[in-house]
Image: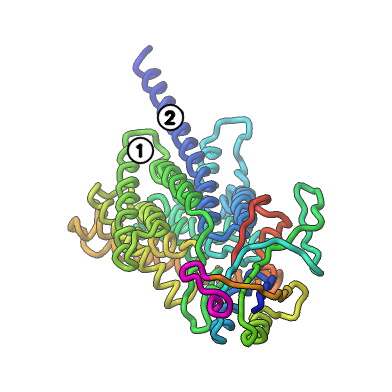
Amino acid sequence: MDMQSTSEALTQLQTNIDIVWTCLAAFLVFFMQAGFAMVEAGFTRAKNSVNIIMKNLLDFSIGSIAFFIVGFGLMFGVTNGFFGTTDFALSGVDWAGPDWNFTFLIFQTVFAGTAATIVSGAMAERTKFKAYLVYSVFICAFIYPVFGSWAWGGLLNGGGWLEGIGFVDFAGSTVVHSVGGWLALAGAIVLGPRIGKYGPDGKARAIPGHNITLAALGVFILWFGWFGFNAGSTNIGDGEIGRIAVTTNLSAAMGAVMAMATSWVLSKKPDGSMALNGALAGLVAITAGCYGVSGYGAIAIGGLAGVIVVLSVFAIDRYLKVDDPVGAVSVHGVCGAWGTLAVGLFGIDGGLFYGGGLHQLGVQAIGVLAAFAWAFGVGLGIFYLIKLTVGLRVSKKEEIRGLDVGEHGMEAYSGFQIFTTS
Amino acid sequence: MKLVIAYIQPEKLNDVKQVLYERGIFKMSVTNSLGCGQQKGFHETYRGVDVEVNLLKKVRLEIAVNEEYLEQTIEGIIEGARTGEIGDGKIFVHSLDDVVRIRTGERGHEAIG
């Protein structure tokens, strides 16, 4: 072989490795849906398990279709400055060929599905199933892609104002997790707390989840899937996969340790559910900076996320009095914002602690605020609209008996006697 | 001496306990039970097939009292458990021949309180 054909063959080989790695990463991220389903089912009561599973199945299914037809084009098409206007349903792609856009679409679809499914947990145990299905269309067809186009449009044909000013969110602390988390906050506020969550004196009560074993399995599955989420976001099969896997893992590990320690200090025991949330908090927080921080940077980001998540869960529960059964707002919204800001502190290129000054931190803050304004604002609007039309919440009677029987006419644990007096 | 047995809706247990506690009645046994009365259970479907009558989840309270506490106990249970809808439950009252406290060997009225 001459030099030219050797170099062509190598290029082709690298392209195929990129495709294989990106698809593999997409499949890992898809498996995170199972993680979310288990975490949410485990952290809530047995009488609502079928409902949780159905929400997780259907938000991904409806979201996949909505993202394919509408969302992908809005996010990655040629932009009008606010959103993309081409590439809907992969228009122009040869369906008989191996176009890169197929790989890119499946990778982006599972990310959109992740943002969508975050909301399910915060709205658990009291939301009308029909209302949730309507919301599922909006997030993947509209809310997520429009914000995504501002930060990530340039990955294909678009180009948004946030990436234009230098906003860094490598794998989506803000684009995916904060957007999902702030939508979850809007949903939980419009819904109101579960019956029995707050006593007559306004004090928060515990409504323990029915299966911490399942919740733990869910967290491990999410941690596993996150290696695809972060390390896959290069879309390139090379040594950077390993580096990103290391920063991701260190942050998750320190998140679990610090959340455990914080709950140990504040509530006298190492709380299992908080430690699990802490691992997720570390993962969410490192998602923005996983490409551009050192090992110690990752440990610092994850450790602080572990502290922040516990304080945030307490604050939202006790002072804001917003009922978020699984801690989705704290894990995804708050720690997503923290992780995004942390790029301005710990980023090797441009971070404050590496002599980069305050510029990057300021840009990161703009992105964080934009995500909150967009997702929370539009979320409030859409959930109020759903409340006024199809209705958002089930009846008191149905909530007490459980949504499994009320919404789906079946029970998750038929044959087992599961009793609750709450 | 009487034994009061009441079947109530599970979610009403806390209210009933609270009302009874305010009336000085705080000794009770609680067990989970399944049953149906006028409510006739509930309707389910599983993979397209109807499942018609299901037993509903209830809570069973047992409270042994001396006569002077009987009406208070009954009223307390009603106050805590009543919603006015079918399914609120039932109260049964038995006569009680004897009561023995195992630790001390006390019997009858002494052992109940």
**As shown in the figure, which amino acid type bears the numbered disc 2?**
Ile
Identify the chain of the residue marked 2, using the numbered disc in the image: A
Q: Is residue A238 above or below residue A71?
A: above
Part of the protein shown in magenta: B101-113
Tag count: 2
**As shown in the figure, which amino acid type bears the numbered disc 1?**
Ile
Q: Quick one: quadrant of the N terminus of chain A?
A: top left
Q: As drawn, which residue projects farthest toward the top? A: A1
Q: Residue at x 47, y 31 (%)?
A: A20
Q: Residue at x 54, y 82 (%)?
A: B21
Q: Nearer the viewer, residue A9 or A46?
A: A46
Q: Quick one: quadrant of the C terminus of chain A?
A: bottom right
A229 on left or right of A38: left
Decide: few, some or many residues near mark 2? Use Cα within 10 Å; few <14, some 14-19, many ≥20.
some
Decide: few, some or many residues near mark 1? Use Cα within 10 Å; few <14, some 14-19, many ≥20.
many
Q: Which residue is mark 2?
A: A17
Q: Residue at x 42, y 25 (%)?
A: A13
Q: Which mark is in front, 1 or 2?
A: 1
> Can residue A79 be seen in the rendering of this structure?
no
Q: Position of residue A175 (x, y in %)?
A: 45, 57
Q: Nearer the viewer, residue B11 or A118?
A: B11
- The answer for how far apart the CA atoms under marks 1 and 2 are is 12 Å
| SS category of the residue bearing label 2 | helix
Q: Position of residue A209 (x, y in %)?
A: 51, 60
Which is the main secondary structure of the residues drawn in magenta? Answer: loop
A245 on left or right of B57: left
Q: Which residue is mark 1?
A: A241
| SS category of the residue bearing label 1 | helix
Q: Nearer the viewer, residue A118 or A14?
A: A118
